[in-house]
Image: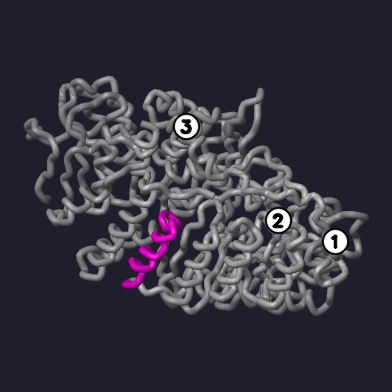
Amino acid sequence: MYKYDQYDQQMVDTRVEEFRDQTARRLAGKISEDQFKPLRLTNGLYLQLHAYMLRVAIPYGTLDSRQMHALADIADRYDRGYGHFTTRQNIQYNWIKLAEAPDLLADLAKVEMHAIQTSGNCIRNISSDHFAGAAADELVDPRPYAELLRQWSSFHPEFSYLPRKFKIAVIASDTDRAAMKLHDIGIQIVERDDALGAAFYVGGGMGRTPMVAPSIRDFVPLDQLVTYSEACLRVYNRYGRRDNKYKARIKILVHELGAEEYARQVEEEFAHLLGQGVEPPLAELERIKTYFADPAFQDASNDTIDRSDPDFALWVDRNTVPHKREGYVSAVISLKPVGGIPGDATARQMHVMAELAKSYSFDELRVMHTQNIVLPHVRKAQLYTLWQTLEAEGMGAPNLDTIEDIIACPGLDYCSLANARSIPVAQKISERFAETGKTAELGELKLKISGCINACGHHHAGHIGILGVDKKGTENYQLLLGGSEAADTSLGKITGPGFSEDGIVDAVEKATDVYLRERSDGERFLDTYRRIGMEPFKEALYG
Amino acid sequence: MAELIRYRDDEAVDHPAVTVDSFLDQSNANAVRVEPGDDARALIPHLTQLKLVEVNFPAFGDGRGYSSARILREAGYTGELRAVGDVLVDQVAYMRRCGFDAFEPDAALDPGDLAAALDRWPEVYQPTGDGRQPIWSKRHA
């Protein structure tokens, strides 16, 4: 994985000192809260309901054991002994004191980490495929391109006061595991005439106006990747709406101009910027690529999995995915124990995951946008030992991509924007399905919960989505069906009137019963919904 | 109005800037003020005539002026480029990087804080036309 050189280290160290100075001036009253707000936000610090929340960047979701240990230590030293992995492949701490934030950032910098641009109206942490470098189906590892763009977008002076936040995802396989088309810019590395290039999709997003990003250009040569990105951003910075924060994302600009007109303006800017020398040489991309070379895989072609323990066999079936190397798999550590808080991990669990990565996965971990952790390169012969530790530490739930593998935002338990709680709903749903034993029968079923219209819990993209709203002072939950974040991206539709907290759990069960009744062989919930439509579900829910 | 901070040796223009619209109409002025909604590219045919371009920041969070500045510098404008309005000490370093060489902030900047902000960053990741060598260029020198 990528390692900082003296320059990268100097950049994060400088940022720590800058923020220390900014915090001191704020605490001394030299700058107002209004003036301080964007400064702390671009350092990942939000003022939430109870305390400051700090969001730490985990670029493209990749980290090593040293970094995971450091995240655990931070949870103990500055928080209450746990952290929350997010849908942006980041980690958040919920109980931070402003005066301690500069020290926390300094601790992060010691392990080549930071909280730069994890919030605010700037280019955010760049996300990618959590199986990058391991997936059997990828064209190339997408992370070097994400790292190139990370450096380009860090402290970009022209794009630090954009109309609104800006999220970029980079993938390199046709199977989209990063919800790429639901980003402000989605990039897919593709091959044409034996050369690699980037397909650009611009103007996707969730939030209150969900949109699937249209294609803007099907091939940008690799030695123009930064220049084209800069053109996309400049058009947005100049013409994105600033009169209404709810219409300020680039998806609205692309929608109002039309994808063709936006693309035309980008081309014009691109043609101009090609003469400005903003593109790093390909040698820089090659330098970055060397850090993402394959680890020293062993010949594991004779590895077998002893399936005599049925609990283990179930976990293998559910939580491991094929690897490009024979004898290896990627193993998913579920942070979704039945009745637990999706994405939460204790400091102890983080230490354990770090050690497991060191012992079994070439010192590498990934954060998934589905709020689980991946050990990307595990030998089949070592899975049983690995699983035993996970079981002992409460991280062995065999529920990847099932209805228990719920994405949920922090909701009204923590978030000052939320209208309703998400966590208790997630807990009740996983408990209900674990109790009835239907989880396995339902197979792949992606359920996603947001506690407000901002959609941090990706409810639009859930096969089943739940949106918490405020209805005359009480929490109310709308049900959506038919969303997908995969290559067949689609947005869910609301079934009808909302439900109470307990009612929504019943409603989810009713919807799954319709599926179990109506499904044909091999159909997932989403497939059945797409075939039979909304009516049978409405009938069961409201009839 | 706080004092004018300049990083140029030539003499400052001593008369008020006109709006982009009236400049394009009368075209004998040498000082113009660009508002966030103005298209800086409209000035490009007239750059040699201009000695001062003020870019107004009515609110510091409106970042359009950064693009206006770079567009003018990329087009070869060498006259004074002055950020005016809600210009704060925590934005001046980025403004310098985008080509501004003068500031006329609504509220005075603390000279110590200003010097610290402008000295802060020894390295930069991107070329922005301000002559600073980006990190990638040093790596592959």
The residue drawn where x is 25% and y is 70% is: A27
User: Which of the 4 image quadrants contains residue A504?
Assistant: bottom right
For mark 3, name the chain.
A
Give x and y (percent) for residue A86: 56, 63
| Label 2, label 3: how far apart the Cα atoms are | 31 Å
Residue A107 shown in magenta: yes
Give x and y (percent) for residue A85: 56, 65
Q: On the image, numbered disc 2 is attached to which residue?
A: A330
For mark 2, name the chain.
A
The amino acid at mark 3 is Ala
The answer to whether residue A429 is visible is no
Give, as a single range, the part of the protein colored magenta. Answer: A99-118
Give x and y (percent) for residue A246: 48, 54
Find residue A283 and name its label. 3
Q: Is residue B61 left or right of residue A131?
A: left
Q: Is residue A107 left or right of residue A515?
A: left
The amino acid at mark 1 is Pro
The amino acid at mark 2 is Ser
Of the pair A112 and A269, the residue shown nearer to us: A112
In primary-sequence order, the first of circles 1 and 2 is: 2
Disc 2 packing (10 Å; few <14; some 14–19; many ≥20): many
The answer to whether residue A44 is visible is yes
Identify whether A253 is placed above or below A165.
above
The residue drawn where x is 69% and y is 72% is: A390
Residue A186 shown in magenta: no
Disc 1 packing (10 Å; few <14; some 14–19; many ≥20): some
